[in-house]
Image (cartoon, grey):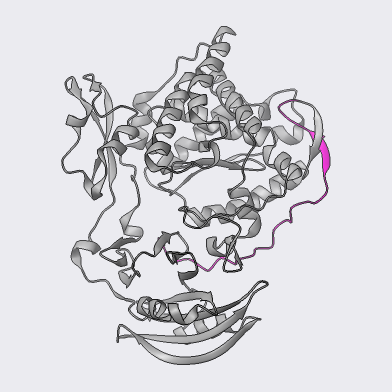
């Protein structure tokens, strides 16, 4: 949770995924084939879901990176199938949107109709503009080849997940996964769209083609996929979207240079890397989670920017999103959702608005004082879903001009076993007064030049801030810890 936001409706009225099909042209192949939606629908879907994605992740607005990404994206777009003379006008006239998302996750993805996203986490892990060009070209390729519409026609899109990897699958406690994400069903479907291996390979090919035609050293893209493999091996987790195992990053390490060589043989010299310019652009970029937007410290979730804290039950998993904080029990059989209610004028009104929804039966209500000081209101209710009955504690507290709301629930049969955890968290919401936490700043990347030949590990400060692992910084710089760095090499060092 990073800022005061209005509650996003769980289900937003957007276009329903088409059950039929349309036959239209593919801008890449020029052939006609069946799609789930028309191009006009794809553009409209992108417009609708872009608003949710931007709100869900937040836009990274520091350092003027957005303008840099937009310009680079437009340069690559000009060499794509979306801007070629023989491409139909409806595709050539489609405007593209390029955004930097405020997420530490190393990721990039695209929405139908021309919406391309890269995260600050991805930008931190790149070493030059050529690598970024391949990534952006890859995502433009997904849009140009209309992969989302192809995939929607081929299968029922329904796999939902929660950012952070705690909750996998389509639902939890009878509620759809998008409820936990606080986004619409369609946004979740697109956000977690799994392309086929053929789609990923085609986008790899297009990413190399577009970046090579723009003059970039497209083979550099292989270095990034080497980093992805190292990230995956270190975390033991799969990597989403472009960074997924479709195909395996190791395969891409070899295939990308081979494709780049083919374009070089056709006369595209591919000389540009623009390392210095790229490093200048990411100088000072936030690395990892931004603690000012909230983090767990000694068993409590603390928010330095909004100056509050509340306890986190032992072994519960916390997922901090821009619009809400989700806490999930160890066995994923209970959930606490915490957010700002900007529509209510008091704690009581916040709770009463929530419990007035259809299907909710109020068992009890009471005036409360969170931490014995802040005006609060609580309701214990049951809620009927399609699959089961839930027990809920709805708790709102007034603090520093905002209304904060907890919606804590489990199956009705398990509710009594969780009510102590629910109450311990919500009723101990309090002011944050620890100056050490209030003044904390995020870790940022400082670009420095090695002044002499040196082993990489010896260039790192000791200790590293925020318990960062030295191997993470080696991966960040696409080197090994024991690798000798030549004098004059630009490297990224975390500082706080």
Q: How many marks?
A: 0
Image coordinates of residue 172 in percent, x first then y, are 56, 64
Quarter of the view holding residue 418: bottom left
Q: Can you see residue 10?
A: yes
Q: Is residue 21 magenta?
A: yes
Q: Main secondary structure of the magenta part?
A: loop
Tell me where the magenta segment starts and ends, as one range. 1-29
Position of residue 464 relative to residue 209, above or below, is below
Q: What residue is rendered at 62% in x and 52% in y?
A: 159
- 236 or 40: nearer the viewer: 236
Position of 337 compared to 230: left or right? right
Q: What residue is rendered at 62% in x and 54% in y?
A: 187
Q: Can you see residue 64?
A: no
Q: Is residue 349 magenta?
A: no
Quarter of the view holding residue 32: top right
Image coordinates of residue 207 in percent, x first then y, are 57, 26
Q: Quadrant of the N terminus?
A: bottom left
Position of residue 410 relative to residue 263, above or below, is below
Position of 106 compared to 40: left or right? left
- 335 or 152: nearer the viewer: 335
Image coordinates of residue 155 in percent, x first then y, are 73, 45
Position of 56 compared to 443: left or right? right
Q: What residue is rendered at 76% in x and 43% in y?
A: 153
Image coordinates of residue 46 in percent, x first then y, are 65, 48
Position of residue 283 relative to residue 103, above or below, is above
Q: What residue is rendered at 46% in x and 24% in y?
A: 222
């Amino acid at each position: 949770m990073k800022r005061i936001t209005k509650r996003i409706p769980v289900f937003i009225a957007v276009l329903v995924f088409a059950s039929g099909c349309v036959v239209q042209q593919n801008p890449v192949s020029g052939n006609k084939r069946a799609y789930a939606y028309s191009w006009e629908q794809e553009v409209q879907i992108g417009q609708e879901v872009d608003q949710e994605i931007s709100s869900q992740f937040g836009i990274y607005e520091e350092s003027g990176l957005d303008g840099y990404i937009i310009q680079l994206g437009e340069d690559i777009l000009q060499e794509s199938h979306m801007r070629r003379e023989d491409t139909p006008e409806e595709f050539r006239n489609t405007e593209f949107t390029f955004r930097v998302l405020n997420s530490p996750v190393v990721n990039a993805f695209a929405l139908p109709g021309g919406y391309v996203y890269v995260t600050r986490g991805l930008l931190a892990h790149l070493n030059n503009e050529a690598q970024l060009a391949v990534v952006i070209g890859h995502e433009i390729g997904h849009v140009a080849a209309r992969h989302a519409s192809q995939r929607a026609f081929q299968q029922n899109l329904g796999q939902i997940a929660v950012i952070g990897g705690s909750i996998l699958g389509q639902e939890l406690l009878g509620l759809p996964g998008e409820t936990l994400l606080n986004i619409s069903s369609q946004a979740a479907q697109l956000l977690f769209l799994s392309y086929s291996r053929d789609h990923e390979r085609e986008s790899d090919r297009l990413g190399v083609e577009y970046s090579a035609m723009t003059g970039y050293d497209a083979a550099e893209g292989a270095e990034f996929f080497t980093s992805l493999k190292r990230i995956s091996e270190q975390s033991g987790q799969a990597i989403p979207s472009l960074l997924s195992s479709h195909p395996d990053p190791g395969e891409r390490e070899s295939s990308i240079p081979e494709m780049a060589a083919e374009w070089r043989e056709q006369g595209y010299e591919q000389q540009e890397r623009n390392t210095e310019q790229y490093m200048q652009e990411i100088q000072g970029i936030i690395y990892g989670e931004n603690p000012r937007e909230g983090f767990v410290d000694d068993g409590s979730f603390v928010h330095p920017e909004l100056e509050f804290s509340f306890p986190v039950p032992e072994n519960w998993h916390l997922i901090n999103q821009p619009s809400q904080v989700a806490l999930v029990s160890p066995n994923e059989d209970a959930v606490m959702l915490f957010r700002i209610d900007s529509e209510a004028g008091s704690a009581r009104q916040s709770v009463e608005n929530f419990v007035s929804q259809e299907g909710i039966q109020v068992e009890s209500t009471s005036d409360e004082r969170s931490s014995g000081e802040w005006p609060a209101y609580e309701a214990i209710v049951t809620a009927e879903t399609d699959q089961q009955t839930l027990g809920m504690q709805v708790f709102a507290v007034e603090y520093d001009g905002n209304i904060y709301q907890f919606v804590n629930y489990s199956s009705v049969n398990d509710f009594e076993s969780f009510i102590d955890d629910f109450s311990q968290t919500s009723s101990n919401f309090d002011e944050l007064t620890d100056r050490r936490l209030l003044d904390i700043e995020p870790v940022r990347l400082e670009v420095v030049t090695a002044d002499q030949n040196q082993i990489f590990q010896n260039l790192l400060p000791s200790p590293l801030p925020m318990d960062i692992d030295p191997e993470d910084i080696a991966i960040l710089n696409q080197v090994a810890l024991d690798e000798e760095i030549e004098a004059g090499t630009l490297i990224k060092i975390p500082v706080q």
